[in-house]
Image: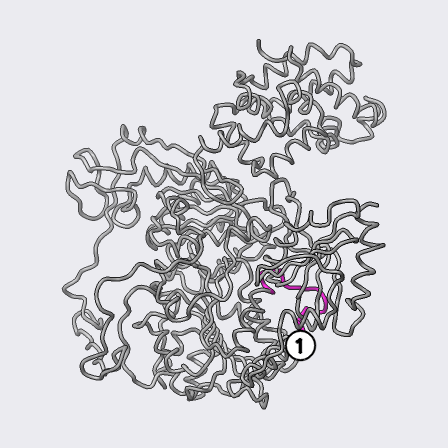
């Protein structure tokens, strides 16, 4: 009896007998999808994870069953059962062969045989034991009330991914348990806003509020630090509009000024903290794009207590506050966000962040506590929900430069002997030929039709790089590359919207300095170019996150690193578990000596405007620093060169050296073929060759990594077969041209027309590589040679004979006599 029969005849009847899918409110979900399978190239994915059965009751997933065929030992599926339960945050999981059942309690760590599957009510009681204490009964009532509200599924077209369901469940459980400070940590691109929406949807329909009396629907504030993030969230909550368009409101300073007060007649409010920090009736606010965003762990200026906009709301007005990107200032004692959150301290406050490390945002963790749920970038990539990436480390021989007498100083002031490094480029100095070299180099490396973000040192540097890109690119479109920075205002926002539009391919490249490191949802991004240092791990994760969103036809994105930011990948903090920050020497900051509060709440006088420079405070004595711009002598310009190195990754997402990659490949190859002759036999047939490549990909050796390896061993002109043969058996690399020439002499057995076609195929192979010999390339090769399949058949015969010749001649290509002796 195979597995399908075992399920149908034995396991499902046993589950139904226990009431699953029979008892009201219970569901028996078959073939439950957990992951999508990691992207492995050419539009293909690794095998996704799928649970045989998931047991649902009262809108909760509370059981997993892993099935094996009857004749297999009944605990063979225990490893999978535990893995699935761990991923799905389910306490009880079962392994069975239809005859015997093995039960596992993931929380208690107990396991053993059971005679039957528990009923829905039994499993519910096992998972959520009936409380005895009254306060626990109240918590249990709210938990059931919150989870009884179904997801808003967009008319049946949307279901949460497993980690989204986990995050939503953990937050709702914390709210039910009266936890008032909650943190969830999820990698960029995993849908934090969608999670926030579903939480708000359930709270709204359950009529949860701070009084926990279900007498009214909650008032929820979504607080961000950039207009683009608040706008995206506002639009993502549009399902509420189908109930009543007045449920949502976007709080803007001009509207407050116009009405003379803050809006109160709504349930879900969206704003940025700069709006809340605007003084009442003033209505003027610095655009959020013009602000520098410090990390939560950095000291901020204190705030006095004039009547800020947020002060118009009573402290208990909001029941829930959702703080987006909360690591960027939300929890720091001296930050403006902290002033807002202190005012609304009665509210439940939910922090959303993509940065789990506490060495740079320790105050966030101190304020919110441990995350109730974490989903890392590495997990998202391995599960297939995020795009993988590769890194090109690029260094030039001019990454450090000392000015000499033959250099022409075009702008600014510099002395002979002044030394600058790559960290200064674009910030303190622009060396024209170096910048031109870097731009030309990365334009040559990328597909110039793919959307690309270029991070520059300053806004001036971003303008300079934009101009070079437009001068050196192949595109003739005047809008090919634009700068999007604070100085570009509304025009920059328009360019950004066009860039984000998947239906538009212009602009193709954007240059920026700080602005686009977060808040840019552009799934098409295939390249990220770093022309400025990124010292902060938090910012580095955000920048990398710009490329992780999935898009049709996008197998990966590439980071081109000119500033050695790739060191972050090798830092133990990269995508690791949250760790406590190092202890800081000395006592914490005491309350203010004058007002006795922390942070200080003393009135602070506004700086007076200077009559000379018309600035407040005066800047007369602090003239702006000039950016040095120099032109090298012709001889030096000709010397500029750069090296490009590829960073390799193991299947766990850990960066490894090229040597480690080759050694690991050498160790894995014997499991795929026993000797050189078997490798040759596998490679000579398109079907078995593809199967071998798939097995390599599933072990973590993607097509792109193998292509990178081919360049590393100087086998660019060789077949991938020769690279594998070189790694496994230390055989010499054979150029494709030589291999094709030897195979050409073995075509005498074919008709003249077939020889002509196979000669054409060999030329394509020499030019483009082994993938030209894949089965699915045959139709395009025929069309390329004969313009139409029918014309090809007129020359070569029916398709079966064409395919037979196409496959058969490949044996000659890889026979030992076609290689160099």
Principal SS element in the magenta part?
loop
Q: Is residue 469 magenta?
A: no
**Res 614 visible:** yes
Instruction: Give the camera-side residue of 408 and 392.
Output: 392
Q: Quarter-wise, where is residue 113 in the image?
A: bottom right
Q: Would you place residue 141 above or below residue 50 in this image?
A: below
Q: Which residue is mark 1?
A: 148
Residue 728: x and y in percent read 55, 23
The number of numbered badges drawn on the structure is: 1
Q: In the image, what residue occupies the spot 23% across and 83% down?
A: 596
Q: Nearer the viewer, residue 244 or 503?
A: 244
Taking 100 as reference, is 315 above or below it? Answer: below
Q: Is residue 153 magenta?
A: yes
Seen at 35% across and 44% down, the residue is 563
User: Where in the figure is residue 590, as x and y percent of width and height?
Assistant: 22, 75
Query: Residue 153's x, y, as percent?
Result: 68, 69
Above or below 416: residue 600: below
Q: Nearer the viewer, residue 607 or 697?
A: 697
Element at label 1: loop
In which quadrant will I find the C terminus?
top right
- Report the magenta residues as a range: 150-165
Q: Does residue 526 appear left or right of residue 160 in this picture?
A: left
Whether residue 228 is visible? no
Report the residue at 53% width, 35% height from top: 705
Q: Which corner quadrant holds the N terminus?
A: top right
Q: Position of residue 611 (x, y in %)?
A: 17, 74
């Amino acid at each position: 009896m195979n597995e399908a029969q075992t399920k149908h005849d034995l396991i499902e009847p046993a589950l139904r007998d226990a009431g699953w899918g029979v008892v009201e409110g219970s569901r028996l979900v078959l073939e439950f999808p957990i992951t999508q399978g990691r992207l492995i190239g050419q539009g293909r994915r690794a095998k996704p994870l799928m649970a045989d059965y998931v047991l649902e009751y009262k809108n909760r997933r509370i059981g997993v069953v892993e099935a094996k065929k009857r004749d297999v030992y009944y605990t063979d599926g225990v490893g999978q059962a535990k893995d699935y339960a761990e991923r799905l945050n389910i306490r009880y999981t079962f392994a069975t062969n239809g005859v015997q059942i093995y039960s596992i309690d993931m929380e208690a760590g107990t396991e053993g045989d059971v005679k039957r599957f528990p009923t829905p009510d039994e499993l519910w009681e096992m998972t959520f034991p009936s409380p005895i204490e009254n306060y626990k009964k109240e918590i249990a009532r709210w938990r059931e009330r919150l989870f009884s509200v179904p997801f808003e599924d967009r008319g049946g077209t949307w279901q949460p991914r497993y980690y989204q369901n986990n995050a939503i469940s953990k937050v709702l459980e914390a709210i039910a348990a009266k936890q008032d400070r909650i943190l969830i940590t999820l990698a960029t691109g995993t849908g934090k806003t969608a999670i926030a929406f579903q939480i708000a949807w359930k709270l709204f329909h359950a009529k949860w509020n701070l009084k926990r009396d279900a007498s009214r629907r909650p008032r929820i504030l979504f607080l961000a630090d950039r207009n683009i993030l608040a706008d995206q969230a506002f639009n993502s909550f549009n399902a509420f509009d189908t109930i009543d368009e007045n449920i949502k409101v976007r709080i803007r300073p001009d509207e407050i000024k116009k009405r003379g007060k803050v809006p109160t007649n709504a349930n879900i409010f969206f704003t940025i903290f700069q709006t809340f920090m605007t003084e009442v009736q003033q209505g003027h606010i610095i655009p959020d794009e013009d602000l520098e965003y410090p990390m939560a762990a950095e000291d901020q200026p204190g705030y006095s207590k004039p009547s800020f906009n947020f002060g118009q709301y009573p402290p208990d007005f909001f029941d829930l506050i959702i703080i987006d990107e909360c690591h960027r200032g939300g929890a720091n004692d001296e930050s403006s966000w902290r002033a807002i959150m202190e005012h609304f301290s009665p509210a439940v406050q939910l922090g959303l962040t993509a940065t789990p490390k506490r060495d740079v945002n320790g105050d966030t963790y101190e304020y919110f506590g441990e995350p109730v749920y974490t989903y890392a970038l590495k997990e998202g990539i391995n599960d297939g929900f995020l795009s993988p990436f590769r890194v090109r480390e690029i260094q030039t021989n001019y990454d450090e430069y000392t000015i000499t007498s033959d250099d022409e100083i075009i702008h600014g002031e510099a002395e002979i002997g002044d030394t600058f490094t790559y960290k200064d480029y674009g910030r303190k100095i622009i060396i024209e030929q170096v910048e031109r070299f870097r731009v030309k180099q990365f334009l040559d490396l990328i597909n110039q039709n793919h959307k690309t973000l270029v991070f520059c040192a300053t806004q001036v540097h971003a303008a300079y790089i934009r101009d070079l890109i437009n001068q050196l690119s192949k595109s003739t479109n005047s809008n090919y590359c634009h700068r999007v920075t604070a100085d570009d205002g509304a025009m920059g926002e328009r360019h950004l919207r066009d860039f984000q539009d998947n239906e538009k391919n212009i602009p193709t490249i954007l240059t920026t300095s700080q602005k686009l490191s977060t808040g840019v949802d552009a799934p098409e991004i295939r390249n990220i170019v770093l022309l400025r240092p990124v010292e902060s791990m938090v910012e580095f994760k955000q920048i990398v996150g710009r490329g992780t969103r999935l898009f049709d036809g996008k197998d990966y994105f590439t980071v081109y690193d000119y500033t050695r930011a790739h060191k972050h990948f090798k830092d133990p903090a990269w995508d690791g578990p949250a760790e406590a920050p190092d202890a800081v020497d000395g006592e914490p900051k005491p309350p203010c000596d004058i007002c006795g509060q922390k942070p200080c709440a003393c009135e602070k006088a506004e700086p007076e405007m200077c009559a000379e420079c018309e600035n407040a405070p005066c800047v007369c004595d602090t003239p702006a620093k000039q950016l040095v711009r120099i032109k090298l002598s012709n001889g030096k310009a000709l010397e500029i060169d750069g090296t490009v190195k590829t960073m390799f990754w193991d299947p766990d997402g850990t960066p490894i050296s090229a040597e480690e990659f080759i050694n690991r490949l050498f160790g894995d190859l014997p499991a795929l073929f026993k000797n050189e002759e078997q490798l040759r036999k596998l490679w000579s047939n398109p079907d078995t060759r593809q199967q071998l490549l798939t097995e390599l990909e599933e072990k973590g050796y993607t097509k792109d990594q193998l292509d990178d390896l081919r360049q590393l061993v100087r086998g660019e002109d060789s077949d991938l077969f020769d690279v594998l043969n070189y790694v496994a058996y230390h055989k010499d690399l054979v150029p494709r041209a030589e291999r094709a020439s030897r195979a050409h002499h073995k075509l005498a057995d074919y008709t003249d027309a077939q020889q002509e076609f196979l000669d054409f195929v060999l030329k394509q192979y020499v030019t483009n590589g082994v993938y030209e010999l894949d089965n699915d390339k045959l139709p395009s090769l025929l069309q390329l040679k004969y313009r139409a399949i029918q014309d090809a058949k007129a020359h070569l015969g029916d398709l079966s004979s064409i395919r037979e010749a196409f496959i058969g001649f490949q044996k000659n290509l890889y026979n030992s006599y076609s290689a160099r002796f």
